[in-house]
Image (tube, rainbow, N blue to C red):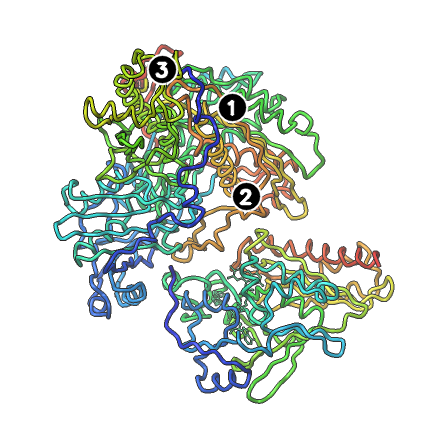
Amino acid sequence: MGSDRAHDLRIVGTSQVMVDAVSKVTGKTVFADDLQLPQMLYGKLLRSTEPHARIRKLNVSKAVAAPGVKAVITGADLPIPFGILPVSQDEHVLCPEVVRFVGDPVAAVAATSEDAAFEALNLIAVDYEPLEPIPSIDTALESDKPQLHDYADDGNIHKLINLEFGDVEEGFADAHHVREDVFFFQGNTHLAMEQHSATADWSADGRLTLWSATQTPHYVHRAVAKVLELEPSRIRVIACHNGGAFGGKSDPFSHEIAAAKLAMLTGRPVKITLTREEVFYCHRGRHPVLMWAKTGVDESGKILAMHFKTCLDGGAYGSYGVASTYYTGALQTVTYEVERYKFQGARVFTNKPPCGPKRGHGTPQPRFALEVQLDKIAEDIGVDPVDLRRNHLQPPNSVTANWLKIGTIGLGECIDAVVEGAGWKEKFKKLPFGKGVGIACSSYICGAGLPIYWNDMPQSGVQLKCDRGGGVTIFCGSIDIGQGSDSILAYITAEILGIDPIDVRVVTADTDLTPVDLGSYSSRVTLMTGNAAVQAAEKVRDIIAFHAAKKLETEPDKVRFADRSVLAADDPDQRIAFAEAVQLAEAAQGTVGSIGWYKPEKSPGRYRGAGVGPSPAYSYSAAIAAVDVDPETGIVTVPKIWIAHDIGQSINPMTVIGQVEGSVYMGLGEALMEEMVYRSNRNVVHKFPSMLEYKSPTTHEMCEIETFLVGDPDPNGPFGAKEAGQGPLLPVMPAVANAVYDAVGVRVDEVPITPEKVFKGLRSKDHRVGPKSFPDIPWPEPLCIPTPAEGGDGKALRVETAAKA
Amino acid sequence: MLRLPRFDYLEPKSLKQALKMREASGDNAMYVAGGTDLYPNMKRRHQDPTTVISLANIRALTGVRNRDGHTCIGANTTLTQVAKHRRIKRHYPAIATAAGSISTPLLRNMGTLGGNLCLDTRCNYYNQTLEWRKSIDYCMKKDGAICWVAPSSPRCWAVNSSDLAPVTVAIGAEMALVSADGERVVPAGKFYNDDGIEYLTKRPDEILTELRLPQPNGWDATYLKLARRGSFDFPVLGVAAWIRWDGDTVADARIVLGAVASYPMPVPEAGAAIIGTSLGDDAIETAATAAFKPSKPMDNTDHGLSWRKQMTRVYVARALKELRANNKLI
Ligand SMILES: Cc1cc2nc3c(=O)[nH]c(=O)nc-3n(C[C@H](O)[C@H](O)[C@H](O)COP(=O)(O)OP(=O)(O)OC[C@H]3O[C@@H](n4cnc5c(N)ncnc54)[C@H](O)[C@@H]3O)c2cc1C
Ligand code: SF4
């Protein structure tokens, strides 16, 4: 049937209405907080008012006796720890002994109304014995004794990584020019419109159902089973449509498990919806990262060696932090050729809400540093920053110094598109003082190569069932968080079976009904569930073709599917309705259905840490930002951004452009204003856990965007598709920083680029604002991994040999 | 969602009735107009009246009237109405601009002139939920003993963050207040107090009935607002500048700073620096410097305090240049 691929695509590649668009815009979509069950109780969490303290006494008796209160639980009721990564099971639903940040939950109440629950919280007396808080990277490194957790790699350093791919010192020695810079990327949060919400129901026959605004129902399923000590088969997790997530709903959370526990205790459904302030405390957003980068280039700007150090402020818990730390060093190599590469990463624990994955997970920070440093290098050696990048792209179908296998690369086309679109040559260095342009590029994974817990099973599975009426239902564990993954499943199925997307019913994100998909993170869904859907749909197509062929008086491999019909390829008048073809198949062999699944190929890296970075494909982006800087105030405005994205093949170009524009919007916020600020000297409170004072751009600050979609279909993507959800965010922040430099000659080596910083830079001697030094960190011995060019095999040298070498 | 506490809600139909209700419920009662300030504050439990008396149904408080050449704006007039009113736009553009710069269209549809003029002072140690404030053991303005912004200071430095207040002071408007004792009229400059807690000279039982604007004869005024974003945000600096022209010469001038103190802060030195000049660049520079000096923002709003102070100079100069350009147009 492979020949069918050659037919013109009818749906894939065209702009289609999203399957849930009308429900969304008419307010009909049921979000988690819209759920109302009979007899439902309302739950609330009491959160710590101390950044670091031991709980001396916790008295809930008054709350238990309060009107309307049905249950109160504390840490003692849920002693089993959990966490998203198997290596950091360091969270409790309710802190049993120690609280680690202002906002850490300590008790939960279920009552007949939200008011009663709120009043009851105020009746819980907690007696805290304050412990020394660790508010910053500096203070975390000061003491070598563990303060927050005793499982850290070293003192308060949760994770330490030291990887060397080839001898970088040799590379620096050969270089024409070597530069060292220090950068800081401030932490920021997802700011999804929808606040987290979960509702749990414990049925009389001993089954738990949990509805939640989550990106990872499968991982939530596992965490609930673990903490509540329930058979997984008794638990059903249903992920509701997410009103935005961006990584902020990809951990299992206290409120989800607390709602379940309270439902079990009371025998009534319990809903917990977080306030906006609580969402700030759940956080899991962008890590603040201090970075040191040393890069050596030849005369043309080709990178001979790069040494990158990162230090992440992790907040109070592990979350995805180990992966985040690896990600701050993983993707530096996939855009431009880097011959030798060394990466040292550290993540510290601090008494603040935990950081985790936000759009771009761990890669926007180093990408910012890298792209700004390249801009400086281009100036140092007198090369146009466009040429410096364009002339040294990583070749397609290659393996990078750190053993990432790259397939298609559309970065060259991306650069060309924005350079031409923006009129770069006429603008760069040529605009009047106060106006400037800047360029930056980036790359992102299309799905993490490995699942979060070690297993050999597929990362994504679908089941497909054909109805006698001509409808098709596709079941998949994936969850639509607004990015349109449900629509992708419908388009792909409809494309292959020759039907309309409206004929496809998509049932997703229900652990009872749907096969496992790991969740909506790491830009994995279109590629992985897409491939699984292609496989399942092709199997069903083959079954139907086999049974329809006789009626059409042709061979099964000459049967075509189009216009809701099944027809003979050489005689299109010979056709029957798709529904009739399904009936023929069902009459002959019973219910027509199939399964499809996807698991990425193994990556060539075989060293410890090689699990983070590999992906079936890499997307690429390039952006040029135009800025206006008011030299009297330092205020930066961005009138326009040109952005090109290598999508491989758009399944739906309209939704791809939507993702690109959304990324630019989010990137602008990170570039110019968003930051998580805590008052270290005031009990480490979050300075402004509200949507009014946590500044994110409004439509007034949003720039004009011109988007170019480029790229060749990637053999590993469904129909050649790559990701669009995260990659296009990455070039925005460095492009803005580089444009500010072009406009007024000020280097702001950190984000956000606030007016205060630009103002200061304009009046300082070196016209630079940013961190001055990188701290001393007790790095372990490096793992030495010879690069492919050096004839390595992807494994690390044994430590003794490495030491000798 | 943050929840409102329980309270009694009264809806008087007349001023008289409102004052009676207020008398009956005593100091645990507060007036409400659009509720855009009071209700969020109640949700966060930093204002906690047990009785709320709505002024929304009192006809006498709405509308824009002309009295002896003075334009009088009823306290209940919404900010949208103020911003869009033809006469206000024509004769008092600074008032219309300031009203139109407040927050969002939604808020302006709900929020009233009176509510804005009586807006509670703001501070990011104070405009926080009960739980958050518990973490810092509260502060002097509500439930606590110390001021976290200036711990050694005996007073509260919460910020007057109304966009309209500095304009009313600069142009010399008046506030009409009514209580059981009758009516009194207070110049805008005397309506505010330099104190984060007792920020109004208005007694809590008094109702602000209207804002009386001076006759538009031979003077001009403008308002410039500095805020992070083009919508939603409170000012971190407001500059209201007023000039009475005598041909090309400045006969009289007032410059008032908003959002850098607990009250709209007049800077007489800045006004004095331009009186008698034709508003040349040098005079403007002197005035800008004079305004910059006493401007002392604290670390309790958005943006850094030293930058906000620096911006005083820039914004005062820009406001004066705008007035100079307007005068040339005529
Ligand atoms: C998100 C947000 C952004 C904002 N941004 C800005 C901004 O940029 N600039 C700005 O200036 N303001 C801003 N505000 C404040 C807003 O202007 C005021 O909230 C609004 O004008 C208040 O009007 P109201 O009718 O809703 O007042 P209410 O909330 O009803 O009342 C406010 C106060 O005034 C008292 N009061 C009201 N009317 C009278 C009266 N007639 N007599 C006596 N006392 C009275 C009330 O008792 C209360 O203490 C913002 C508010 C929010 C929530
Ligand atoms: S200025 Fe001081 S006393 Fe006033 S609200 Fe702020 S912290 Fe409290």
- Give me the chain letter of mark 1: A
- Residue on which the image places disc 2: A672
Check if mark 2 and mark 3 are on a common chain: yes
CA–CA distance in space, label 2 to label 1: 28 Å
Crowding at mark 2 (Cα within 10 Å: few <14, some 14-19, many 20+): many
In this rendering, would B145 be left or right of A630?
left
- Residue on which the image places disc 3: A568
At label 3, the amino acid type is Ala
Residue B237 picture location, percent across and down: 61, 59
Front position among marks 2 and 3: 3
At label 1, the amino acid type is Val
- Give me the chain letter of mark 2: A
Is A568 placed above or below B274 here? above
Image marks 2 and 1: residues in contact by CB distance under 8 Å:
no
For image coordinates 50% across by 80% down, the residue present is B12
Check if mark 2 and mark 1 are on a common chain: yes
Query: Residue B188 lies in what quarter of the image?
Result: bottom right
Check if mark 3 and mark 1 are on a common chain: yes
Q: Secondary structure at mark 2?
A: helix
Is A335 placed above or below A292 here? above
